[in-house]
Every structure is written in C-alpha cells, then in structure tokens.
Image (cartoon, rainbow, N blue to C red):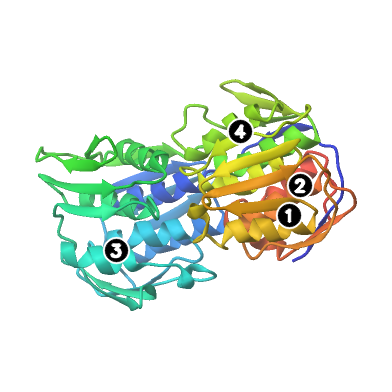
C-alpha cells in the first residue's frame, strides 16, 4: 500500500492507541493464570493478534466481546505442535519459554524480519533449565521440548529485556522456589517493571527484584485468583508520534495515557520538553503544540523505540540533536539506525551515526520525497509525521507496515486534520 501525505496543519483531540506491550503481556499472564481473565480495552494490532493466536495454540479459549476479551485457561496445554509469532519480537522471546512449560515438542516460527533475528539466547540458556532445543544456527525455526525446570541461572540482558520477561513469567507459572535469575547489563529496565506489574495484576507469583540484577523466587506458598479483570493502558510508543506531530504541526490534545505508567517510552515527554515545544501534562490528557524548537540531547538506551519519532522531531529542531543508544537498533524490524539515515536523507536531513550516537542536523527544512517503510511500522510513522511540515507531498511505500502496532495511525492523522490519501 502507498500513502501520500501532504503538508498539513493539525488540531483537535485524539485517543492514544492501545499498548501492545501491555496487551501482549496480559495475554501471556491470562494463559498462565488458571481461570477466567477479562481484558478491557484490548488491542488489535498484528502483534496483538499474534499473541492471541499463540495463547489459543497453547490451550487458552478466547471469547471476543464489545471492547473486551474473556480468556479462559487451565495453564499451558498445547493443542498445536507449532506456534507462529508473526513479526512480533516480544511474542517470540516471551512465549517460547512459556511454551516450554509443556512436555510436548513445539516448533516456533515467525514472519517478516523475525527469521533473521538472532535467537542464540535460547540455545545457550534452555539446556540449563532442562529444555531440549535446536535452531537454524541461532535463527528460526526453533524446536523446543520441555518441561522447563526452574533453576538459578545467569543471563545476558544487553540484547533485549524480552527474553527475561518470558523467563520471569514461566518461572512463576512453574512454581519456582528458592531460585533466582541473575541478569548482567540489563537494557530497557522499565519494560521489566511493566512485566512485574502485569504479573502482580494477574495474581501471579512475583519474584523479589534485587536492583534489576537478580530476581529471586521465595519458597512461600501462593494462591492465584480464579478471576481477573485487567485494563490495557494507552501506548506511549504509538503516542510518541502523536506528541511529535503536535510539536511540529499544530495544537492537539491526547487522551488515554497513564502518566504514571511503567512503559519505557513515557520518556518521550522529556525529549519533547527539552526541544522547547509547548506541552502541558495532566492526569487526563496531554496538550502539545508548536514553538521555536531547539536541538536536544537524549539517551534512548532504555527506550530505543523512541528513535524514529525523535528523529522526526529533531529534524525540525535548530542545531544538532544527539540521541544515545544506536546499538539497540540493529535487530529491530529493520536496522533502524541505517534505515532512518537513509529515508530521512531522502527528505534532506543529514544523520550521522557515530559509535553509539545518532546526530541529527535539524532546522534546515524538509522536502517531500518518496520514502520506503522497509516493512518497519515505526519508520513509516516517523516519515508520515515529518511529512506534515515538509515542502511538497511525501509518498510512503509499503505504508501498511503500521498494522504491526498502530493500525489506526493514518486515520488518526486524518481526524486531526492532516491530508492523507
């Protein structure tokens, strides 16, 4: 699909999209919580759909109602020998150890860029917890056979926190006691805080968090609830693009975001404030609007998904903006450091990659251009936001990539007054 975006002034009020980080974790917790879980405000992005398909393949029953889901589960009882994680990196890293709670042989597959992403983690860690595993030289497909046996292990958290999320949930469901998961160099700590919060909300046994360096499971007895109601919160990752759109193209109001959320991408507020944009943050809504924008310095090591929207913001800030954490971008839907450099380069923005830094030379104006999403949802949205204040029309190829996380994105831009065809 090709989308054309014309220079536009925007205004109005919009509801933030649903958090797929929250939704996918809720799906996993509902599978592991024996009983009935009602999920309010569920997401329906491609990643959310993948998570729902996975938990059904692993034995859960899902009933779809109006603005809510009812999930019934007796634990991991696979009804299929294969689960497909779509293009979701979180799903494959989180659900693989969960699937290994069963003693059934299961094949894990994926689509898009997922088969090319490194999965060596499983080959290294799974044998330590009695899971048979084989892969295609550290890539998909992955073949596993449990059952997982919780033991004290030590893992590397530098590539992604998502592996740890899966282990934390699986250990809890396996009744881990008097064991710990030790973690070196953990990245994206806020996402682990989100995982622990979701586990708590679903009544799962939550390990003791020892400064994000070890997670210890006590030998205490635990009785989970028979019924859970969980409301999926608004998505700071998707809303980051709306906040940037308001900062560069017009006054808007965004509702549905929890300002006390543990989501890592809530840090976008710091960057928007540092850029000099007008912003007012209240419990019920956030107002943002244009002002003379200045270059800023931001560390995105713990929130690498903010690189695309912040590049769009930095492109309109006078001076050279520096964003730290480029090393976190290599294994996303695309190699985002290179992809951002290439696509924004087409619009006239010079981006330099220097060690772990990205330097954006902004404030010189953008030209409309034909750009490509590289099948990466966040690249498509970043280009779309930048296009609102570019000179001339911008054509985005493979624009349907947004369906991975924010299917309503272009419609939301239209609701705010943008010209999108």
Nearer mark to the viewer, of 1 and 2: 1
Within 10 Å of the Cα at label 2, are there few (<14), some (14-19), or many (20+) other Cα atoms? many
- Which quadrant of the figure contains the C terminus? bottom right
Residue under numbered circle 1: 344
Q: Earlier in the sequence, mark 4 or mark 1?
A: 4
Q: Residue at x 15, y 55 (%)?
A: 150
Mark 1 residue crowding within 10 angstroms, few (<14) / some (14–19) / many (20+) = many
Q: Residue furthest front?
A: 354
Image coordinates of residue 189 in percent, x first then y, are 38, 41
Q: Is residue 301 visible?
A: yes
Task: From the image, tell me which residue sits under label 2.
Answer: 386
Is 409 on the left-hand or right-hand side of 105?
right
Q: Secondary structure at mark 4?
A: helix
In three-dimensional space, the C-alpha distance between marks 3 and 2, rounded to whole angstroms, equals: 41 Å
The residue that disc 4 covers is: 271
Q: Are marks 4 and 1 in contact (CB under 8 Å)?
A: no
Q: Earlier in the sequence, mark 3 or mark 2?
A: 3
Q: Name the residue: 64% across, 60% down.
A: 339
Indicate which disc residue 99 carries: 3
């Amino acid at each position: 699909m090709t989308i054309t975006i014309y220079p536009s002034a925007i205004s109005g009020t919009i509801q933030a999209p649903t958090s797929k980080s929250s939704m996918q974790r809720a799906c996993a917790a509902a599978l592991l919580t024996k009983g009935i879980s009602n999920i309010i405000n569920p997401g329906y992005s491609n990643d959310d759909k993948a998570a729902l398909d996975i938990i059904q393949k692993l034995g859960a029953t899902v009933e779809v109602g109006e603005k809510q889901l009812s999930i019934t589960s007796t634990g991991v009882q696979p009804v299929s020998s294969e689960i497909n994680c779509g293009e979701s990196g979180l799903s494959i890293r989180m659900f693989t150890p969960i699937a290994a709670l069963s003693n059934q042989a299961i094949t894990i597959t994926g689509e898009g860029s997922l088969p090319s992403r490194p999965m060596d983690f499983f080959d290294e860690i799974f044998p330590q917890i009695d899971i048979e595993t084989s892969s295609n030289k550290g890539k998909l497909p992955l073949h596993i056979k449990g059952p997982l046996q919780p033991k004290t292990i030590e893992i590397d958290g530098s590539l992604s926190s998502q592996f740890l999320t899966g282990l934390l949930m699986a250990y809890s469901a396996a009744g881990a006691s008097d064991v710990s998961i030790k973690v070196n160099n953990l990245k994206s700590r806020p996402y682990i805080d989100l995982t622990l919060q979701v586990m708590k909300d679903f009544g799962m046994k939550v390990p003791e968090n020892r400064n994000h360096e070890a997670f210890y499971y006590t030998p205490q007895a635990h009785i989970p609830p028979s019924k859970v109601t969980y409301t999926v919160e608004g998505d700071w990752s998707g809303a980051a693009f709306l906040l940037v759109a308001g900062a560069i193209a017009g006054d808007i109001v965004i509702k549905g975001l929890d300002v006390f959320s543990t989501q890592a991408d809530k840090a976008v507020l710091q960057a928007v404030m540092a850029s000099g944009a007008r912003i007012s943050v209240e419990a019920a809504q956030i107002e943002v609007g244009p002002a003379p924008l200045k270059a800023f310095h931001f560390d995105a090591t713990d929130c690498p998904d903010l690189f695309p929207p912040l590049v769009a913001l930095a492109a309109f800030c006078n001076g050279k903006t520096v964003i730290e954490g480029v090393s976190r971008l290599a294994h996303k839907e695309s190699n985002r450091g290179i992809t951002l450099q290439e696509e924004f380069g087409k619009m006239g923005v010079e981006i330099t990659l220097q060690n772990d830094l990205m330097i954006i030379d902004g404030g010189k104006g953008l030209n409309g251009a034909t750009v490509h999403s590289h099948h990466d949802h966040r690249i498509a949205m970043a280009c779309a936001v930048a296009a609102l204040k570019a000179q001339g029309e911008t054509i985005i190829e493979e624009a349907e990539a947004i369906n991975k996380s924010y299917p309503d994105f272009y419609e939301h831009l239209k609701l705010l007054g943008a010209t999108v065809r």
